[in-house]
Image (spheres, coloured by chain):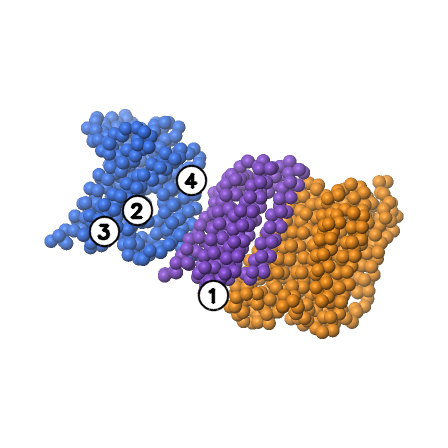
């Protein structure tokens, strides 16, 4: 009985985890940041409260906003959630993971970004256009790097299916792999750019000259804004757990192994907490770089990813 | 024993000269050092001539017909250059072109350079061959920049960087060579000894050796000055002091070519084909053509003769690539005659530019009237290097051309074209410099007669008559290189 | 795919050496270059020692020590003193911009991999796979010399190229015989003194270490 419903159960658990985990992770990061800066924090649940508050607020639409503007929040949220259903977060045994491999995953994120960019242009404001052009620059540079990086992992695990990759990586004995080390470094750089963290973008500022992601969202309000904010929190969570799944998968529940789930949950919580610490360390240690340097930053990511791939061929 | 003296004398002379510095008798010590090396090298040559190839110093040194003649040549040209440089450098010193410190440096480095070349020639170890080639580069780099003019420093920097890189690639080739040899001889020095390598070349892995040869070709080819790796050569030759130009052109290029040919023998033995020959022919022909056409455009006298050196190295490389007894004989002879002729030319060119205090050919006029020896010396040198019959260069070029007609008839016209263009260019430039009326600014000068005369006589003799022992030697060397 | 631990460590070190080669290409500050160069030397020395330990070849310890003293301490120190005496603080100037250089660099790595593949198949050593990295380091050093304008950066490129050669010797053949290694080290040391002298000569003659000014000797003057 349980066996029959196990796939559905695990999939629902995962989706709920992604939905709640996103705001929690962001809350954790903000909390840590407050501590490092000697401020009192608003608590772990503050992002969640922000989102719920936004849901009950009135939604204001620009007069000239088209259907693109209105549907974007749903598409973005839906796409992110879809990605959340594919990435093995606590268990490698995800039924939906078979429907899309890692290339499709990159495409799903690209879809969300594409619509965000369109929505930024849709209202015709100056900031929207500026944010869009910057976002497109960043993503056009980040996408090849992200593909190179995940391909390296695919090469090592001989598969592009996420659940298979994670399974493969957890079962083989530990080997020092320079290719994975490079891919991980590249992935970290890309994740920083993709999720709009310092030093590429600053999620907590609306300073007009520096913002990238936020500039596209300036016209949103109410539930639209709530969905987009929520989606971007989930995105951070998903990138963190994708990184964990690909590079530090130990502790994740294997295929047909429900007994491991509690352990996997604890392991995930610990790893994410450490990721949060890492993010805060990076963000307090570095300042935001000039937009022109972003290209170089991502170029470096691409270089690292290529080196990872090359060292797989050359050295392993 | 003679071998040890050959090597130690120049090293000792370098040390002594570093100590003596700019004293009056430094020039004489320089001459004595080179002369002693020359005498010892003749003894060595006799030993080898009588008892055949010999190994010495625990297989560390190897002397056979191929390298002993080059060693004698090196010691000989270094002696005559030392004699020439006595008057030349005194003139430079008197006119304040170089200072006190530079003089000390010049003498010590000159001897060190000779030592490096002799070590390169006489060692049996391919790795040590590389080291001494690098040492030869390093010891001359600062000699090229001796005058400290912007152009001289630029030339030296180019020389340093390009040859440094080139020779680094040759080291990679040497590593590959050792890699292949290690499979046959195991760890240790045995795998780098040329005698072992050439004996067992059939067992070496051909793919690795082909790859190694490409690196060695590019590496040592840079030092030979083959086009398109020649950029450093005209600069280094034109900006350094003339005695250095003479030894760079007359000796260093030969030694680099020697290193390349030694490696070629091993690679050919492994690959059982003449792939390396084709590569060398291509580089050689390209050098002949590019250099001879560049000769037409030159304004600086030393630069022009530097291009002529590229051309002649191209001829020798082409001939070695061609292979076969006649071409190889021709190549060996050509290395000899080019070295003697070109250093003689540089001696006269050095005096000519001192007389006119410029290296610009359009300002050098009427050398015969100014100083008959310099004028006629330059004229005869040009006649000889252009390959006019009674001189030795004609003999060697003729031999190579015959071989080319026979084995690669479609390449012979290209070869001939290069020589013809060079001939025309050299004469067009040399005539007005030698004949005509001297300019008003020409100053008289005590020229160094002896080296020029000795070289020119030698080159004439070699054109008319081939000494028996030399003939023997070359035949033995041809056997070795087959 | 079961590699021995020594081979794994060695390939990680090789990967890091490759990374430092690229870092040299990317680095803009002169002092940063020296630090990266010293790191590269350190990695090379550790790698040589690891190979020496795993293969039981003690002469490799000597060459590891040689690399350590020469490439990690002596040469960076000499260069450091030079840039202080000559007051070089400016950013590295490049002829080709950095992203393009990186792409060319990646292409060179692939080229080296292709070039060394016949050797990899023949070799039985655990270090055989690092030969491609060694050749890449050589090529990248060459690239650095071509694409940079300042004398100092060219020298660092040259020395990094030498590092690649040492690495090639260790990875292809467990090191050349000691005579050769010592001779090569001596040559590098002499070269170091020569470029030291050179810097002063260039500086006093040109008033800068910029090779742009060295364009007098051209064919069509």
Mark 1, residue position: C122
Left or right of residue B59, residue B419 in this image: right
The residue shown at (19%, 28%) is A56
Crowding at label 3, few (<14), some or many (≥20) Cα neighbours within 10 Å? many
Q: Whole-Å distance between the Cαs marked 1 and 3?
A: 43 Å
Mark 2, residue position: A244
For chain A, the rendered hue is blue
Q: Nearer the viewer, mark 2 or mark 4?
A: 2
Residue C214 placed where, x, y %? 64, 41
* Marker disc for residue A297: 4
Q: Quadrant of residue A156?
A: bottom left
Badge 4 and badge 1 both on one subunit: no
Left or right of residue C79, residue B398 in this image: right
For chain B, the rendered hue is orange
Query: Is residue B283 among the parts visible in the rendering?
Result: yes
On what subunit does the disc labeled 1 rest? Answer: C
Q: Quadrant of residue A237?
A: top left
Left or right of residue B480, residue B466 in this image: right
Residue B282 placed where, x, y %? 62, 60
């Amino acid at each position: 009985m349980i066996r029959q419903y196990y796939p559905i159960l695990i999939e629902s658990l995962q989706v709920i985890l992604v939905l709640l985990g996103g705001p929690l992770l962001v809350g954790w990061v903000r909390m840590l940041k407050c501590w490092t800066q000697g401020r009192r924090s608003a608590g772990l649940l503050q992002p969640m409260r922000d989102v719920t508050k936004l849901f009950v607020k009135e939604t204001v639409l620009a007069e000239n906003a088209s259907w693109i503007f209105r549907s974007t929040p749903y598409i973005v949220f839906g796409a992110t959630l879809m990605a959340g259903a594919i990435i093995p977060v606590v268990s490698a045994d995800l039924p939906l993971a078979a429907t899309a491999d890692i290339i499709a995953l990159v495409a799903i994120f690209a879809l969300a970004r594409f619509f965000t960019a369109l929505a930024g242009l849709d209202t015709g404001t100056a900031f929207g256009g500026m944010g869009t052009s910057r976002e497109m620059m960043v993503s056009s540079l980040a996408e090849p790097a992200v593909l190179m990086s995940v391909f390296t992992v695919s090469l090592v695990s001989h598969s592009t299916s996420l659940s298979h990759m994670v399974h493969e990586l957890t079962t083989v004995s530990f080997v020092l792999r320079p290719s994975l080390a490079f891919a991980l470094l590249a992935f970290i750089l890309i994740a920083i750019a993709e999720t709009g963290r310092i030093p590429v973008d600053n999620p907590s500022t609306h300073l007009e000259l520096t913002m990238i992601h936020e500039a596209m969202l300036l016209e949103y309000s109410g539930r639209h804004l709530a969905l987009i904010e929520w989606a971007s929190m989930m995105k951070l969570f998903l990138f963190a757990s994708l990184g964990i799944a690909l590079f530090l998968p130990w502790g994740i529940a294997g295929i047909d192994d429900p007994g491991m789930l509690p352990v996997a949950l604890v392991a995930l919580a610990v790893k994410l907490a450490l990721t949060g610490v890492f993010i805060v360390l990076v963000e307090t240690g570095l300042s935001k770089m000039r937009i022109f340097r972003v290209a170089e930053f991502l170029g470096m990511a691409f270089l690292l990813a290529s080196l990872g791939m090359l060292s797989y061929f050359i050295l392993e | 024993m003679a071998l040890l003296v050959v090597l130690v004398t120049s090293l000792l002379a370098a040390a002594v000269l570093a100590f003596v510095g700019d004293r009056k008798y430094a020039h004489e010590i320089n001459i004595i050092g080179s002369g002693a090396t020359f005498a010892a090298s003749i003894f060595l040559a006799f030993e080898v001539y009588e008892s055949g190839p010999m190994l010495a110093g625990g297989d560390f040194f190897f002397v056979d017909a191929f390298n002993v003649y080059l060693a004698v040549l090196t010691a000989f040209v270094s002696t005559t250059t030392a004699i020439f440089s006595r008057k030349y450098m005194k003139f430079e010193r008197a006119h304040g072109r170089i200072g006190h410190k530079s003089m000390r440096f010049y003498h010590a480095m000159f001897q060190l350079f000779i030592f490096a070349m002799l070590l390169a020639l006489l060692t049996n170890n391919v790795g040590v061959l590389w080291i001494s080639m690098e040492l030869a580069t390093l010891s001359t780099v600062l000699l090229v920049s001796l005058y400290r003019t912007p152009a001289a420093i630029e030339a030296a920097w180019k020389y340093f960087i390009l040859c440094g890189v080139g020779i680094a690639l040759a080291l990679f080739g040497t590593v590959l060579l050792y890699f292949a040899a290690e499979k046959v001889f195991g760890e240790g020095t045995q795998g780098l000894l040329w005698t072992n390598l050439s004996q067992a070349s059939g067992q070496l892995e051909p793919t690795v050796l082909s790859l190694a040869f490409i690196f060695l070709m590019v590496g040592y080819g840079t030092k030979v000055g083959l086009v398109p790796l020649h950029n450093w050569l005209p600069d280094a030759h034109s900006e350094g002091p003339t005695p250095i130009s003479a030894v760079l052109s007359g000796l260093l290029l030969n030694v680099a070519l020697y290193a390349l040919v030694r490696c070629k023998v091993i690679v050919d033995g492994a690959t059982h084909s003449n792939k390396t020959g084709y590569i060398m022919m291509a580089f050689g022909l390209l050098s002949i053509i590019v250099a001879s056409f560049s000769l037409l455009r030159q304004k600086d006298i030393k630069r022009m003769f530097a291009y002529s050196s590229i051309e002649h190295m191209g001829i020798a490389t082409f001939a070695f690539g061609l292979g076969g007894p006649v071409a190889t004989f021709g190549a060996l002879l050509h290395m000899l005659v080019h070295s003697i002729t070109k250093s003689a030319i540089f001696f006269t060119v050095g005096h000519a530019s001192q007389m006119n205090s410029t290296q610009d050919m359009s300002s050098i006029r009427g050398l015969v009237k100014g100083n008959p020896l310099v004028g006629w010396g330059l004229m005869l040198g040009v006649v000889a290097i252009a390959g006019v019959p009674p001189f030795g260069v004609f003999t060697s070029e003729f031999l190579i051309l015959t071989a080319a007609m026979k084995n690669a008839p479609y390449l012979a016209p290209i070869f001939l074209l290069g020589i013809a263009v060079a001939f025309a260019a050299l004469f067009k430039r040399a005539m007005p410099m030698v004949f005509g009326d001297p300019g008003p600014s020409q100053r008289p000068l005590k020229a160094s007669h002896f080296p020029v005369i000795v070289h020119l006589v030698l080159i004439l003799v070699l054109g008319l008559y081939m000494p028996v022992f030399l003939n023997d030697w070359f035949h033995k060397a041809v056997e070795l290189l087959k | 795919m079961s590699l021995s631990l020594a081979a794994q460590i060695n390939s990680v070190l090789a990967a890091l050496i490759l990374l430092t080669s690229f870092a040299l290409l990317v680095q803009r500050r002169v002092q940063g270059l020296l630090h990266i160069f010293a790191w590269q030397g350190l990695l090379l020395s550790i790698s040589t020692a690891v190979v020496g330990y795993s293969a039981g070849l003690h002469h490799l310890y000597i060459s590891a020590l040689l690399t350590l003293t020469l490439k990690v301490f002596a040469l960076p120190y000499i260069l450091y003193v030079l840039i202080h005496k000559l007051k070089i603080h400016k950013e590295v100037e490049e002829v080709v911009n950095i992203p393009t250089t990186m792409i060319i660099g990646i292409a060179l790595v692939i080229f080296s991999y292709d070039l060394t593949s016949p050797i990899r198949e023949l070799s039985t050593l655990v270090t055989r796979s690092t030969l491609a990295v060694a050749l890449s380091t050589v090529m990248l050093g060459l690239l650095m010399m071509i694409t940079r304008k300042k004398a100092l950066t060219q020298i660092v490129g040259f020395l990094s190229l030498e590092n690649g050669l040492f690495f090639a010797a260790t990875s292809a053949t467990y090191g050349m015989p000691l005579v050769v290694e010592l001779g090569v080290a001596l040559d590098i040391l002499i070269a170091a003194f020569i470029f030291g002298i050179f810097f002063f000569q260039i500086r006093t003659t040109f008033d800068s270490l910029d090779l742009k000014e060295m364009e007098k000797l051209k064919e069509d003057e």
